[in-house]
Structure formats: structure tokens, C-alpha cells
Image (tube, grey):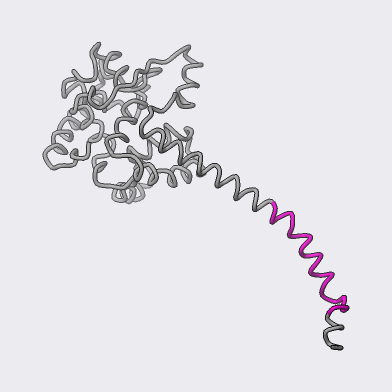
């Protein structure tokens, strides 16, 4: 009994514990709030990913800023059934030839980019869709980290054909020209379902630098790149790498 009384009345440890608890209380509260906000944000993003599988995404921030700067942009959404298959194959051949075979990240392309010292890109079409639809432009580590987290989510919840359809409708092809419908008319005065293999390859050749290249008046470099893309589109059709779309 005496020992129990000593434990109850001893002031040596309880004030220290009380002080520690007082110091930790604000941090615990902050951590709980941060965790709650993170869970809410994750739930909202997940809901948007699910929604955009069936509903076409609205104008993204980059389109909005370009619209304000230029006084308007040209974009008209078209489904995959209204896009020439050769155009889809050309874009995949140009931007992400292993699109049907990876889960959002092309590890072989990443290794090659690292070996090249970062002089070449390794972003897949899925990563570009995540950036264009859900995130912002720029090369910050924060954006890259969020993109890396969202990419497999989109791969799980969207079929490959939907990923490619969204990409073809939000990609920039010239200043103020977004999506393949606007691009087909801007350069060739036609619709995306009537593009020839050569025209499709020329459009795909613009994607790394849409503001610095032209499909209707291609430079020697763009023309040569388009020729290589045309061959690549035929190759992925033959070897099955276009099967998923």
C-alpha cells in the first residue's frame, strides 16, 4: 500500500509527462487535420478519375490560360469511332510505342532516358493524360510525384482506348489548337476520320513541339520524322502493339 501511495503522490514523473503531452497535443491535432485533408483530396481525385472515364473532361488550366491569352482556342471533342485508326497508331508510334504493353510507366524508356542523361523524355501517354487533365504544367518534383501516384490509378480505372481518346482530344497541335479534330481542320481542312497515313504521321510529328512545327508546311526534319512515324505505325499494327485500342 505504501508503494502505491508513493506512486500516486510522487511528483517526479507526472509533471514531465503532462508537459510532454501538452507539447505533443498541437502536433497530433495538426497531423490529424493533415491526414483528414489528404483523405478528402484523395477521395475527390478518385471520384474525378472515375467520372472522367465516362464523361469528357472540361477545359484544363493550360487551355484556359491559352484561351485568355489568345482570345479563344479551337477544340472539339470526338470519339475514337470518329478518328482514323491510322492517326491513333501514328500518335502511339511517335509518343509511346509500348502503350499497350505497360501499366503507365515504360521502364525501358526510363532506363534509356537515364542513360542519355535526361536529354530524352520517357513520359508515357498515360502520364501525359494525367498531367493534362488533372495537374498543371511545369517540371516541379511535386507535380512529378503526384503524376506518379495518379498514373497507375488511371491505368487501373480506364481502358487503354479511353486513355488514348482523351489524349487525342486534349493534346496541343499548334498555338490555340487542341485535339485531333481541330488539328485536322487547321492543317488539312478535313476531319480526323478522313486523314491519310501521311497526314496522320505529320500531325503526330508535331507533338513534342506543337508551337515550333507545322504539318501543312513541314520542315525537312518534320517531314523525315513523319516518314519514320508512318513506318512505325505500320510496324505496331503488324506486331500487335496496337491491339489494345
Residue at the extreme bottom of the image, as rendered:
2
Q: Is residue 212 visible?
A: no
Residue 132 left/right relative to 188: right
Residue 201 left/right relative to 156: left
Q: Residue at x 83, y 81 (%)?
A: 7
The quarter in which the C terminus is drawn is: top left
Q: In this figure, what is the number of numbered marks?
A: 0
- Is 62 one of the magenta-colored residues? no
The quarter in which the N terminus is drawn is: bottom right
Position above or below: 120 against 69: below
Q: Give coordinates of residue 228: x percent, y percent.
A: 18, 32
Q: Residue at x 21, y 30 (%)?
A: 90
- Main structural element of the magenta stretch: helix, strand or loop? helix
Residue 144 left/right relative to 115: right
Q: In this rendered view, identify the residue nearer to me: 70 or 167.
A: 167
Dividing the picture into quadrants, the one containing residue 80 is: top left
Q: Give coordinates of residue 236: x percent, y percent.
A: 16, 38
Q: Is residue 177 visible?
A: yes
Residue at the extreme left of the image, as rendered:
238
Boundaries of the magenta span: 8-29
Q: In this rendered view, identify the residue nearer to me: 19 or 211.
A: 19
Q: Residue at x 36, y 24 (%)?
A: 172
Q: Give coordinates of residue 32: x percent, y percent.
A: 64, 52
Position above or below: 208 against 123: above
Residue at the extreme front of the image, as rendered:
1
Q: Residue at x 65, y 53 (%)?
A: 31
Amino acid at each position: 500500500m505504501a508503494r502505491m501511495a508513493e506512486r500516486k503522490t510522487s511528483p517526479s514523473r507526472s509533471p514531465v509527462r503532462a508537459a510532454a503531452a501538452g507539447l505533443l497535443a498541437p502536433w497530433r491535432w495538426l497531423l490529424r487535420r493533415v491526414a483528414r485533408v489528404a483523405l478528402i483530396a484523395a477521395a475527390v481525385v478518385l471520384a474525378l478519375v472515375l467520372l472522367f472515364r465516362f464523361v469528357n473532361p472540361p477545359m484544363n488550366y493550360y487551355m484556359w490560360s491559352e484561351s485568355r491569352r489568345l482570345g479563344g482556342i479551337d477544340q472539339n471533342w470526338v470519339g475514337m469511332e470518329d478518328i482514323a485508326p491510322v492517326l491513333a497508331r501514328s500518335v502511339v508510334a511517335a509518343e509511346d510505342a509500348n502503350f499497350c504493353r505497360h501499366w503507365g510507366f515504360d521502364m525501358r524508356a526510363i532506363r534509356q532516358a537515364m542513360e542519355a542523361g535526361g536529354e530524352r523524355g520517357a513520359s508515357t501517354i498515360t502520364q501525359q493524360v494525367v498531367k493534362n487533365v488533372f495537374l498543371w504544367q511545369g517540371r516541379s518534383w511535386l507535380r512529378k510525384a503526384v503524376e506518379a501516384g495518379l498514373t497507375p490509378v488511371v491505368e487501373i480505372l480506364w481502358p487503354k482506348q479511353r486513355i488514348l481518346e482523351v489524349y487525342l482530344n486534349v493534346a496541343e497541335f499548334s498555338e490555340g489548337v487542341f485535339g485531333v479534330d481541330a488539328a485536322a481542320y487547321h492543317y488539312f481542312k478535313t476531319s480526323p476520320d478522313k486523314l491519310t497515313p501521311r497526314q496522320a504521321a505529320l500531325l503526330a510529328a508535331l507533338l513534342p513541339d506543337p508551337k515550333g512545327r507545322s504539318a501543312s508546311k513541314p520542315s525537312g526534319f518534320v517531314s523525315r520524322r513523319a516518314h519514320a512515324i508512318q513506318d512505325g505505325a505500320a510496324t505496331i499494327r503488324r506486331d500487335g502493339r496496337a491491339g489494345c485500342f
